[in-house]
Image (cartoon, grey):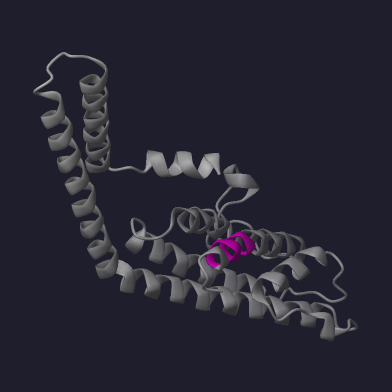
Amino acid sequence: MAARLGSRVKSFSLVTWLAVALVAIAALALVIGITTSRLDNWMPNIATEALAIGVTIAVVERIVERERRRRVQPRVDRALGVLSSDYVKFARMAQFDYASTHLSSDLTEVPEDPLAMLKFWQERHGTETSSRSLPGRRPLLLEEGITLVRKAQRIAEADRELLPSDLVIAIDNLSQTFGGRGDLFLDMVEDNYLPPSQGLDNWLCLVMVENARHLGEALRRHGVV
């Protein structure tokens, strides 16, 4: 709770801080007027005017901010909808990948929920009974991951200032490997400086699923998955 309050305080605009300062001045003037005889005729007026201006500024800023949010909300809703749709497609591909690499497994235990599916896939990674690699190309799960990263990055580039910050961070981390210390996921796949191989493909799928799961968690926090 303290961290959340600190985050909100840091996000205060200059206008908000001005309103807070004026309210503080009003309170100080009121205290001085009550506790001392200095400037008896001025303190009540100073307190009243400062409080009135501060409250007016705060109210007007809230109205302006509400109008701004109303105008940009369709763009935010569209971005969240596209991200959610592409994320669900990736989770469905993870279902297909699991089914095609665990031919003898009981598929009734495979979750339908996209977040649960990616966690399920992670927990069973390494237990495959057949290869996901395809002759001369990357696995389908990896190709779907590339599509997800590309679309998510385009959305972040267009609406970065409008999207929730945790969602932007999750998108930025989609293409990261080794916690941001390694080569970018897209670079490793698209540049083909490392040719397709079963071991590499399996590791890249694992990285992609891990990063996508964090994106899904951010999307769920905003009620769109």
The answer to whether one can see residue 135 in this image is no
Q: Is residue 124 left or right of residue 196?
A: right
Q: Which residues are magenta?
A: 212-219
From the viewer's side, name the closer residue of 80 and 196. Answer: 80
Q: In this figure, what is the number of numbered marks?
A: 0
From the viewer's side, name the closer residue of 155 and 17. Answer: 17
Decide: is 177 above or below 30. below
From the viewer's side, name the closer residue of 187 and 75. Answer: 75
The answer to whether one can see residue 133 in this image is yes
User: On the image, which quarter does residue 28 sit in?
Assistant: top left
Q: Is residue 23 left or right of residue 130?
A: left
Q: Magenta stretch containing residue 198, yes or no?
A: no
Q: Residue at x 18, y 31 (%)?
A: 47
From the viewer's side, name the closer residue of 66 and 87. Answer: 66
User: On the image, which quarter does residue 214 sit in?
Assistant: bottom right
Decide: is 224 above or below 67. below
Name the dominant secondary structure of the magenta segment: helix
Q: Position of residue 148 (x, y in %)?
A: 52, 70
Q: Residue at x 83, y 86 (%)?
A: 108
Quadrant that contains the C terminus: bottom right
Q: Position of residue 49 (x, y in %)?
A: 12, 36
Q: Residue at x 27, y 69 (%)?
A: 70
Q: Can you name the residue that lies furthest to the left here?
A: 41
Q: Magenta stretch containing residue 216, yes or no?
A: yes
Q: Position of residue 118 (x, y in %)?
A: 70, 69
Quadrant that contains the N terminus: top right
